Image (cartoon, helix red, strand yellow):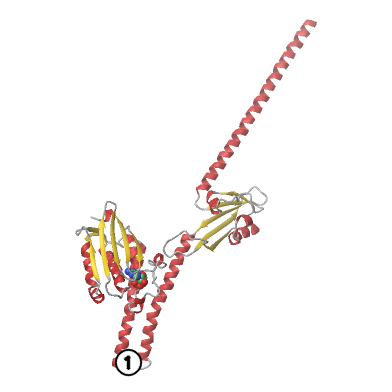
Amino acid sequence: MNELLAILTLVSLIALAVALLRLRRAKAKLRETSELWKVRSELDLRQAREERDRLLDALGDAFLLVDGEGNIRFANRAARDLFGGRAIVNRPVGEAFLDRRLAEALLKSLETGQALQSRVVLPQQTSLRGDLETRGFNAWIIDAAPLRDSPEAKPFTRVVIRDVTDEHQLEQIRKDFVANASHELRTPLAIINGYLENLLDDGLIDDSPMARRFLTIMRKHSDRISRIVEDMLMISRLESGEAGALKLEPFRFRSCIHDVLERLESLIQQKQAEVVIVMPDDTLLINGDRFYWTQVLFNLVENALKQNLHKGLRIEIGCARDEEHVRIWVADNGVGIPSADLPHIFRRFYRVEKHHSQQEIKGTGLGLSIVKRAIEAHGGTVRVTSTPGRDTRFHIDLPASVAV
Ligand code: ADP
């Protein structure tokens, strides 16, 4: 009996030991599995974060996350670039934004908990842009809004900073254009009105020689208004880029030069200018809009004639092609363009101050603007170099494909 009890006790003890062993193994396995889960979920979290950062870095706009205390907690690549690589994460907004005006919109949104958008325009310290009609300003839109589903007591705020400098500059150019155009039109209109007043109110209409003189002056100024309006329309057609603005057809460049010289014949005679054509390939055909090319050459040659009053003026019109380019140039040995004016010369309404010819023949100031836009519409570029008194040269470069 005792033996049986002893055996039973032994069996129970063995069973208990096996159960304990199993339990320990199960515990160890559980620990192992939970470790694995922890590592895996940390890995997933890290991957999700990296994925988010990659996506936010791909954004062209600067993106910031700001916590409820006003500290920057995340900045994407565009934001880091905007701050010139300075360390901004974990720093208060007020410290990170060196210019108070940039921080203001954001701080207001943090204070009020409201979404806010504001536009900030600041003068450029240094302009790297050498574009046409560049104004020295940078412009941004700051868009801040609290994250409503933020788990924190004080919600995070997301901030998008969009660089709208290009749009701002375009807007500025449009405003300037309207202001300049109004100014240019106002002068001849005021003159015409003045003479009309003389004729009608002061009774000079009955004095026929005087009336004829006044009417002649009025016609000159109304012609000027028409020229300005025509030029503005041409620029607007070229700028609109609308299909059909250019009618492309192959034409002989030489004959285009001849047309222009024929139209300017009397001015060439009057100035006793020598005009030389340098064109190794006389039969060169250009695939382009002949109307605009005539306009380009006319404006360039007319300028050379208009701006130069002295004897011995020599104008060269040239065209040559190689494997990659078709080069066209118009050069003269006249007064030239001062180097300070060269970067602005293609701007609308820009004229070199105190060019002595301007008392005599006042252009619209739109000629070179038309030249530049017409050449660009043909896929080319134009630039100017000038050594006053020796060589003022407009260089036009076109892709070889325009030559037929
Ligand atoms: P404008 O109608 O006054 O001729 P443009 O746009 O054609 O206007 O030219 C702008 C200015 O550039 C001119 O007013 C003139 O001062 C200068 N300019 C252009 N071409 C020449 C040149 N060949 N020689 C000297 N000055 C020039």
- In the displayed image of the protein, which residue is found farthest to the right? 2
Helix, strand or loop for disc 1: helix
The image shows residue 89 at horizontal and vertical percentages of 61, 49
Total marks in image:
1
Within 8 Å: ligand 1 and the Cβ of disc 1? no
- In the displayed image of the protein, which residue is found farthest to the left? 283
Asked where in the image residue 383 lies, by quadrant, the reply is: bottom left
Is 208 in front, or is 393? 393
The image shows residue 198 at horizontal and vertical percentages of 37, 90
Is 183 in front, or is 203? 183
The residue that disc 1 covers is 205
Mark 1 Cα shell of 10 Å, populated few (<14), some (14-19), many (≥20): some
Is 21 in front, or is 4? 21
Asked if residue 196 lies left or right of residue 28, the reply is left
The image shows residue 184 at horizontal and vertical percentages of 39, 76
The C terminus: image quadrant:
bottom left
Asked if 74 appears above or below 33 in the picture, the reply is below
